[in-house]
Amino acid sequence: MASSDSTLIFGDGTFEEQIQELVNYLARDLADDARTSFISPFQNALLSSDESRKQKTITLVLGAVKGLGSGSEKEIEGFFNLLYAHVLALFPDEAGLKEQLTPIIHTISVAPNPAIIKYRILTNLFNILPRSSPLRLQVYQALVALVTSQDELDLLGVKKADIERWISEWNVTAEEQSSLWKSLSDAFSKCGPPERFLEFQLSFISSLPQSSTEVQPAILVAIATALKTPSMFDLDTIKKLPSLKLVQSTPLFGLLQVFLNGDYAQLSDWLSKNGASLGDSGLDKDILERKIRLLSIAALATQNVGKDLPYSAIASTLQVPAADVENWAIDAMRANLIGGKLSQPTQTLHVTRAAHRSFSSEDWAHLEKRLVNWRADMAAVLDVLAHTKQSRKPRAAQDAEILAEKTVQAAA
């Protein structure tokens, strides 16, 4: 998608000749008598001496567009490109553009033609519109709906940063912004990875006023998606939602807290009280248990970076046999939650790296303690170096005196 304004380029011929080309394309499949009758209003409009005759003529052409026509893909694309160029030249104000092009966007979207040609002519319209035009939002949503219906969402190359930039350029209302984020989250819900869905679902939630009735259901869907996705361990973005407090009385909120701060024992307690409702949110008990065990290993590891973590401590926290600890540790490494080295002889995991679920006040305190210890260690090293340097000075002076004496003796 173009990020800058396009320059209008017209083909050869006068305005009248180009209008005749457009009309002839529309009348292509009509019988001779019907074609003559169809063309007549356009000819009369062109002969008018009215100063606004060009606008009236293009409006007539737009009103006659009931589909994409029966031309080749190249002809269809050429027809709409020429039509777009005249509309933008004759209706420079935003209100005029919206009035003239909104019906065309709908006509293209519902046409029975192959999706690829509809995608091309809608993309051409998006790119030819001024960068700041709010009408771009409408075209983009039509494109999102089109590619989603074909399970070809990757074709758009959707990037959150682009959407945020476009929204700022288009100066659209808060409701329109929410509508766009909702369109994208729905699209990724249907044919995208859950991580991308959650990315846009959170943007949708953030775009809504907290008084909206859509907020609470949207948050619950986001929580459920994050928890039921086996590879999704970072829950901090959900934790930071200002509107999260709106669902704090729900069982899912309690489950989220377990995954943010708890362990397997707390999950078991939650399941004993709420397990019957898992299916309502599409949650799976096995996936939840596996995730909390992996997160629990990571939590233990964050407290033991640079140390040896006994298998027995891991087994106790995960509530698994000691013989299974290595498999769980390897899975945690594969999930990029921890780094380390396993030792069967010592039955320990030497931790070299660990990911935090979220950085809490306790984590900051732990980090502060480690930094203080590191600073003390560095101070001790500096003291040793300073002492060593100082102790070498007398020896150096003594060596210099001996050398001087030898020099004097040699001279004598």
Image (cartoon, rainbow, N blue to C red):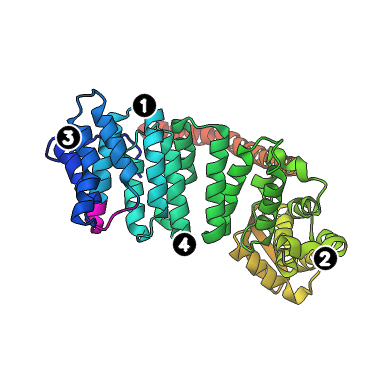
Residue 411 falls left or right of residue 53 = right
Residue type at tag 3: Phe
Quarter-wise, where is residue 308 in the image?
A: bottom right
Question: Closer to the observer: label 3 or label 2?
Answer: 3
Q: Any mark on residue 151, and which?
A: 4
Quarter-wise, where is residue 279 in the image?
A: bottom right
Magenta span of residues? 67-76
Q: Is residue 193 visible?
A: no
Residue type at tag 2: Ala
Q: Earlier in the sequence, mark 2 or mark 4?
A: 4
Residue under numbered circle 2:
276
Residue under numbered circle 1:
93
Residue under numbered circle 3:
15
- Vertically, is 13 above or below 313? above
Question: Closer to the observer: label 3 or label 4?
Answer: 3
Q: Tell me whether the residue at label 2 lies in contact with that at label 4, contact meaning CB atoms closer than 8 angstroms.
A: no
Question: Closer to the observer: label 4 or label 1?
Answer: 1
Q: Secondary structure at mark 1?
A: loop
Q: Residue at x 70, y 63 (%)?
A: 282
Q: How many marks?
A: 4
Question: Closer to the observer: label 1 or label 2?
Answer: 1
